[in-house]
């Protein structure tokens, strides 16, 4: 089996779809990341879903990695998962109080 099969025109009986064998599973992984603008260090997390839990996992990693910081500024776009009830509730916790979310464009 070829790992990158070329799909082109092929003969098949009318009304029947020919099966094309492809390798493995069609799995998707989603990443969320943040970069420290002073050091260039990247922090990232991955998940099978692109949802607010992925974003919360990233925020938790930021708080853990920068536990000595008084404030952690996070610059974001206005994607819906950044503003869910879960996220807003988490920002009210002691760890969440360190985070300042800045949405662009303002």
Image (cartoon, rainbow, N blue to C red):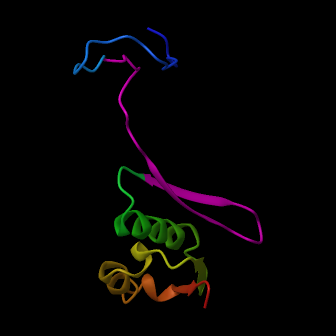
Q: Toward the viewer: 43 or 65? A: 43
Residue 34 lies in quadrant = bottom right
Residue furthest left as drawn: 15
Quarter that holds the C terminus: bottom right
Q: Is residue 27 magenta?
A: yes
Instruction: Check the image and report above or below for 105 versus 48.
Output: below
Q: Position of residue 45 (x, y in %)?
A: 49, 56
32 left or right, relative to 71? left
The quarter of the rendered structure image containing the N terminus is: top left
Name the spot of residue 40 as percent of width and height, x first: 75, 62
In the picture, measured across the screen, residue 48 lies left or right of residue 101, that is: left
Question: What's the residue at 37%, 34% (across, down)?
Answer: 26
Q: Nearer the viewer, residue 44 or 95?
A: 44
- Give the farthest residue toward the right: 38
Residue at 59% x, 86% y is 71
Residue 100, how many percent across, how many down?
55, 87
Q: Residue at x 42, y 13 (%)?
A: 10
Question: How far across and down, in percent of the image, does residue 54 sit?
Answer: 40, 62
Q: Which residues are magenta?
A: 19-46
Looking at the image, residue 40 sits to the left or right of residue 72; the answer is: right
């Amino acid at each position: 089996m070829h790992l990158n099969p070329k799909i082109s025109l092929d003969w098949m009986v009318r009304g029947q779809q020919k099966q094309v064998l492809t390798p493995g599973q069609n799995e998707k992984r989603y990443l969320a990341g943040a970069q420290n603008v002073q050091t260039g260090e990247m922090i990232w997390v991955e998940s099978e879903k692109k949802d607010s839990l992925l974003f919360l996992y990233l925020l938790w990693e930021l708080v853990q990695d920068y536990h000595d910081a008084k404030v952690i500024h996070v610059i974001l776009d206005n994607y819906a998962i950044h503003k869910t009830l879960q996220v807003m509730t988490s920002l009210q916790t002691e760890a969440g109080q360190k985070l300042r979310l800045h949405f662009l464009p303002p």
